[in-house]
Image: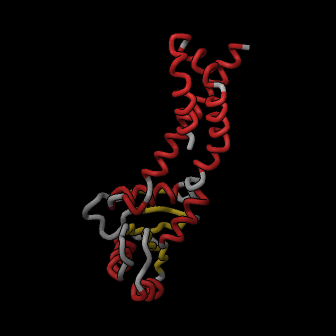
Amino acid sequence: METGLIIGISAAIVLLLIFLAARKKTEEISPDEMDGRGFEQYCAHLLSGNGWEIVSVTCASGDYGADILAEKDGVLYAIQCKRYEKPVGVAAVQEVVAAMAHYKCRRAAVMTNSTFTRQAKALAQENGVALWDNEELLKLEEKNGTADFAQKAAVLVVPMGIGMFLYSDLVTRILLGDQWMEASSFIGLWSLTSVV
């Protein structure tokens, strides 16, 4: 009985650590708080999680207007990534059109955490450039599973945290020994607040 309880509590702790790491990872990849290079990596991650083959993430400078070269359904794309606070203008579309020719891509796209100006939309339509704004990124996140991983993990972790809170005396005795019994209330509260 005690061995099973120790294994159960150990598993709860491991799941708690996985949940906290996933929650931290989700917080780290907020596009609005990234630098430009981080946003490029984030976009590459979203694309690869949605069935794209990432051919390369180009170097930070001298990229000829493409940050990512990716393939989907046998079609090579030049992709420009723009992490902006304001709407993305025509320059991004012009750059990716030039990159499409330079890298011999059949298609081009611009990804942003923001939106696009009316002029950028018009130029993109004239040149066959796909525009993926903040709403499209959210759709990619949902398909990729990164947006709701923490919610799925919480279904498992929250009950374990509540159980550790309710049985904090037993958890403390098993994990730390009798000499730590005075800390059992603190450990119970810690386990409960850690899952929130």
Q: Residue at x 51, y 11 (%)?
A: 179
Closer to the camera, 184 or 141? 184
Q: Quadrant of residue 78?
A: bottom left
What is the total number of numbered labels drawn onto the structure image? 0
Q: Is residue 169 left or right of residue 176?
A: right
Q: Residue at x 61, y 59 (%)?
A: 143
Task: Find residue 32 and report its horizontal and vertical position in percent.
Answer: 40, 63
Q: Quadrant of residue 37?
A: bottom left
Q: Which quarter of the rendering shows the N terminus?
A: top right
Residue furthest right in the image = 1
Residue furthest top in the image = 178
**Residue 140, above or below 177:** below
Task: Find residue 91 and report its horizontal and vertical position in percent.
Answer: 32, 80
Q: Is residue 20 left or right of residue 174?
A: left
Q: Which quarter of the rendering shows the C terminus?
A: top right
**Residue 95, above or below 15:** below
Question: Is residue 103 something one can see in this rendering?
Answer: no
Task: Find residue 13 and report its horizontal and vertical position in percent.
Answer: 57, 29
Q: Residue at x 35, y 83 (%)?
A: 90
Q: Residue at x 60, y 60 (%)?
A: 142
**Residue 123, above or below 72:** below
Closer to the camera, 192 or 53? 192
Task: Find residue 65 and report its horizontal and vertical position in percent.
Answer: 33, 70
